[in-house]
Each structure stands twice: as C-alpha cells, then as structure tokens.
Amino acid sequence: MLDRDGPVPLYVQVAEVIQERITDGRLRTGEPVPSEAAMEAEFGIGRSTARNVARELRRRRLVHTVQGEGTFVGPVGVPLLKPTRALYVAIAEDIAGRVRRGELRPNRAIPSESALMRRYGVAKVTARQAIARLRDDGWVVTVPHRGVCVSDPKNWPT
C-alpha cells in the first residue's frame, strides 16, 4: 500500500515494489517491467511518476530501457524475453470471447478506449490496435454518434 502523504516520494515507493518483484523472482532477467500505463492503472499514479519509477530503477541498475520496446529487467545486453503474441491481440481475443459468451451484445457499444486502457493497463495506441483488430476480424463496427459496437452475428468470424 502506498503512503501518499508520507515523506517518501511515490515514485520511490513504486520502485521498491517493483524491485521486490525482481528480487523475489516474479520479474525475471530479460522480462519487461510494467509499462507506464500499467503502473498508472495498478498504482493510481500519473504518467510522470511512472517515468520517474523507471528512471529510479535504472539508477539502481536493476533495469535498462530499449528505445521503442520498453524497460526490461537486467543490464543492457541481456536477452529480452518478449511475449509470444502482441498485447493488443490478447486484448482483442479477450473481447471477442466476451462477445461469444454474450457478455457484449450485438448493436451495443464495447468498452471505450479509455476503459480498455484502465482495464488492461495499456497505452492508448494498444487499445486502438485491439479495436482495429476486432474491426478487421468482423467483431465490431463503428456506428456514427454511438462509437464502436458489436457487429451483427452473421459478420462474426467462424
């Protein structure tokens, strides 16, 4: 639990939590640390605080950042362990599963970009990629003045 009124800055407290995950093996060498968006969602912090967390972890020599790819556990040069599939694909598959199960019904709006960002702890671009994937696969359509809605079941992939 973060002490938002205490003398220790929030970014230092969050860095301690992530350092503990590295130390106890929940985050292994080469694995990505939580993204800024994921930290925002998990810890209820702002983007600049999340950036400071990564900076603090780098200062402690626990992680390194690869431009355009993220921040990873360990020193520069360690082999990076990347997910086997893109995160936006996993999000799209999760939403498609909710459509199949009837949790999201035809002609009804799916969760907004900002709701997807909060739920999955991802950046806006990842949420947009997931929606684009759903649209390309036929699960959703954009309805003027209503947003992105579940498409007619006859358009769903088989």
Image (cartoon, rainbow, N blue to C red):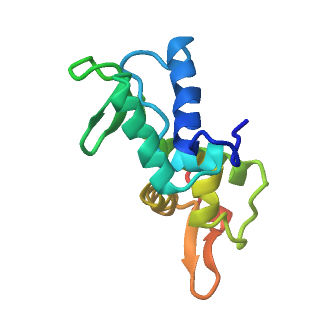
Where is residue 61 drawn, in percent x and y? 33, 23
Where is residue 11 drawn, in percent x and y? 52, 42
Residue located 45% across and 31% down the image: 33
Q: Which image quadrant for residue 132?
A: bottom left
Residue located 60% across and 77% down the image: 147
Q: Please identify the quadrant where the N terminus is shown.
A: top right
Q: Is residue 33 above or below residue 36?
A: above
Of the pair 128 and 107, the residue shown nearer to us = 128
- Report if residue 158 is visible in the image: no
Residue located 62% across and 49% down the image: 41
Q: Is residue 121 above or below residue 66?
A: below
Of the pair 89 and 16, the residue shown nearer to us = 16
> In the displayed image of the protein, which residue is found farthest to the top?
24
Of the pair 86 and 123, the residue shown nearer to us = 123
> In the displayed image of the protein, which residue is found farthest to the front?
7
> In the displayed image of the protein, which residue is found farthest to the bottom?
145
Q: Is residue 38 above or below residue 58?
A: below
Where is residue 140 drawn, in percent x and y? 58, 65
Of the pair 142 and 121, the residue shown nearer to us = 121
Where is residue 96 drawn, in percent x and y? 62, 50
Q: Which image quadrant for residue 3?
A: top right
Left or right of 117? Residue 35 is: left
> In the displayed image of the protein, which residue is found farthest to the left?
77
Count of number-bearing discs: 0
Residue located 45% across and 16% down the image: 28
